[in-house]
């Protein structure tokens, strides 16, 4: 799952400020498919009165916004996405609603949809109202709404915004009252979210339900009968905050904060995570991802390429906000289109090509996605080299031959003859290097080189290879012609390794199997 996050109003904008309609946005489908993404996630497309809210202050929960056309045109757009094997996820705000008189606020003159208790009804920070999730009729309204979008528009998933504001009574500024047990948990919200997810799973085939939950609330994902909230995925906000804080540092200081880049692996499998580099990180004075990076122009682009490679090798599904794929220079501006003119510049078009190649590597290599929620799919070959700010990670698929090693260098120094522990004896090759001059790098690559393992222990492995590590760069390495050690051989001295026999050349040498892709 590799998600392209989009705000429809500002992906492109007409010269006079008018919006592109659904019928005019079909080029987005071609673009997303060409770039190798699997899903489009849209900021809310429900009707909302204020463009500045980006759709999160909803007024028409059953209405697709008229900004881009009619409901049938949106349905046709989704159908075309599906024809091109692209899934659609849409953001929804079920935690609060805006106070416009023609909306849900004091709908019949009383607190019909919101809490009667003003301390629970008012969202002071956002100037909105909270749904009273203890009322059966409000539950019915929201549950029916979710099913409406799945059944009528055939969306594939929804992201529920601001789940933390639903779970905690003290999330907002101002006064609050504890629950009946004296805690700060919103008990009816917990019950609602579990019922919400159970209902969707009951009536929808294979839905994607994503929680934007910014705290350490346990068991957000997983089945409700085990005590979880029932979401399919959760945004990994801890990973995002630590990683961006680390990447914003001058490389000279990174060795003192090495834990920021390694700590996320301590909890990477506690939930089913999505790694978000989202709209929230490139707005409100936070700067664009490119502008967050330290150094001169070359170093900024190199740092950003390293960030994207680290994000791709890290366990978890992927989400990248529009414009970040070609290194937009400015912050995201909701009232303007992206800086597409930057694609006339060499660094930006090469960044776009890099993301395309990285996306295709991710899509084509099972090791990068097949076991995303278990330590069985991950090996931290070397997490400890803080002095050189280098980490070596390995991702593994279900088949022993499916693995990918990434050597990530967060300093602008080239390291020659760098020893990397490898799992098997044989020949390895570099399959992608972020420092390639095709990507505006300095071309410190090993393209075409045969990396032969040496049978000595290193990094707690039985073998190692020597490589050249690029500056502020990442080298992706996989086995080319390797021996898979210590596999059981059946009585007939034959073994099938991950697929059909005609895909592998298998030679029995006692306890060694040679696997060579034909």
Image: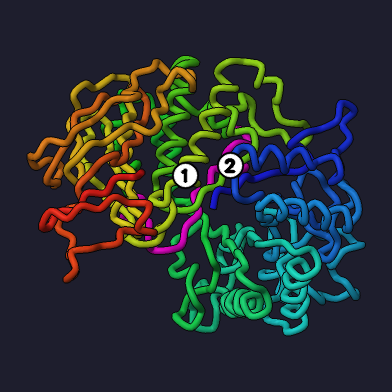
Residue 65 or residue 398, whichever sits in front: 398
Q: Residues within 10 Å of mark 2 (few under 14, many from 20)?
A: many
- Horizontally, residue 180 falls left or right of residue 146, namely left
Mark 2 or mark 1, which has the lower sequence index? 2
Identify the residue shown where x is 87% and y is 63%: 103
In the rendered image, the vertical position of residue 284 relative to residue 397, given as above or below? above
- Quadrant of the rendered structure where residue 351 is? top right
Please indicate whether residue 445 sits to the left or right of residue 55 in the image. Answer: left
**Depicted 22 relative to depicted 212: above or below:** above
Say which mark, if any, is on residue 362.
1
Q: For the residue labelled by badge 1, is the local secondary structure a helix, a strand or a loop? A: helix
Extent of the magenta region:
264-285
In this rendering, would 479 be left or right of 30? left
What residue sits 40% from the left and 31% below the top?
A: 432
Determine the CA span between mark 2 and mark 1.
Answer: 9 Å
Q: Are marks 2 and 1 in contact (CB under 8 Å)?
A: yes
Where is residue 76 shown, x and y percent of the image? Answer: 83, 54
Task: State left or right for residue 111 relative to residue 275.
Answer: right
Depicted 182 relative to depicted 394: above or below: below
Which mark, by number, is residue 36?
2
């Amino acid at each position: 799952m590799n998600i392209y996050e989009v705000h429809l109003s500002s992906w492109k904008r007409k010269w006079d400020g008018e919006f592109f309609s659904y019928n005019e946005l079909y080029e987005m489908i071609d673009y997303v498919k060409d770039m190798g993404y699997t899903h489009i996630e849209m900021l809310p497309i429900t009707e909302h009165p204020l463009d500045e809210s980006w759709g999160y202050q909803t007024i028409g929960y059953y209405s697709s916004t008229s900004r881009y056309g009619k409901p049938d045109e949106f349905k046709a757009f989704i159908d075309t996405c599906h024809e091109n094997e692209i899934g659609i996820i849409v953001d929804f705000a079920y935690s609060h609603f805006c106070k416009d008189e023609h909306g849900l606020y004091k709908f019949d003159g009383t607190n019909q949809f919101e809490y009667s208790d003003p301390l629970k009804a008012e969202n002071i920070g956002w100037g909105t109202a909270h749904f009273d999730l203890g009322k059966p009729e409000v539950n019915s309204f929201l549950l029916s709404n979710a099913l409406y979008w799945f059944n009528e528009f055939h969306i594939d998933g929804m992201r529920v915004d601001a789940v933390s504001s639903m779970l905690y009574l003290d999330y907002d500024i101002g006064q609050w009252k504890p629950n009946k047990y004296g805690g700060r948990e919103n008990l009816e919200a917990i019950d609602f979210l579990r019922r919400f997810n159970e209902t969707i799973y009951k009536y929808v085939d294979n839905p994607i339900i994503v929680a934007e939950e910014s705290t350490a609330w346990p068991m957000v994902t997983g089945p409700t009968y085990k005590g979880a909230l029932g979401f399919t995925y959760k945004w990994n906000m801890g990973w995002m905050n630590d990683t961006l804080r680390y990447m914003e540092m001058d490389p000279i200081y990174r060795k003192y904060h090495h834990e920021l880049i390694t700590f996320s692996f301590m909890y990477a499998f506690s939930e089913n995570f999505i790694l978000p580099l989202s709209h929230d990180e490139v707005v409100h004075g936070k700067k664009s991802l490119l502008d967050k990076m330290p150094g001169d122009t070359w170093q900024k682009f190199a740092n950003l390429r390293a960030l994207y490679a680290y994000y791709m090798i890290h366990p978890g599904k992927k989400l990248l906000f529009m414009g970040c794929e070609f290194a937009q220079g400015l912050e995201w501006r909701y009232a303007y289109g992206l800086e597409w003119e930057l694609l006339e510049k060499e660094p930006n078009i090469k960044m776009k090509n890099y993301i395309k190649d990285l996306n295709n590597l991710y899509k084509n290599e099972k090791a990068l996605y097949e076991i995303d929620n278990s330590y069985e799919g991950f090996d931290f070959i070397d997490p400890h080299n803080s002095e050189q700010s280098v980490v070596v990670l390995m991702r593994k698929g279900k088949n022993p031959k499916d693995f990918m090693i990434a050597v990530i260098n967060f300093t602008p120094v080239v390291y020659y003859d760098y020893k990397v522990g490898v799992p098997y004896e044989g020949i390895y090759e570099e399959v992608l290097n972020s420092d390639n001059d095709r990507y505006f790098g300095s071309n410190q690559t090993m393209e075409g080189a045969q990396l032969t393992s040496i049978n000595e222990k290193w990094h707690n492995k039985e073998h190692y290879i020597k490589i050249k590590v690029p500056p502020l760069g990442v080298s992706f390495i996989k086995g080319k012609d390797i021996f898979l050690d210590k596999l059981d051989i059946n009585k007939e001295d034959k073994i099938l390794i991950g697929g059909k026999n005609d895909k592998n050349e298998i030679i029995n040498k006692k306890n060694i199997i040679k696997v060579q892709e034909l």
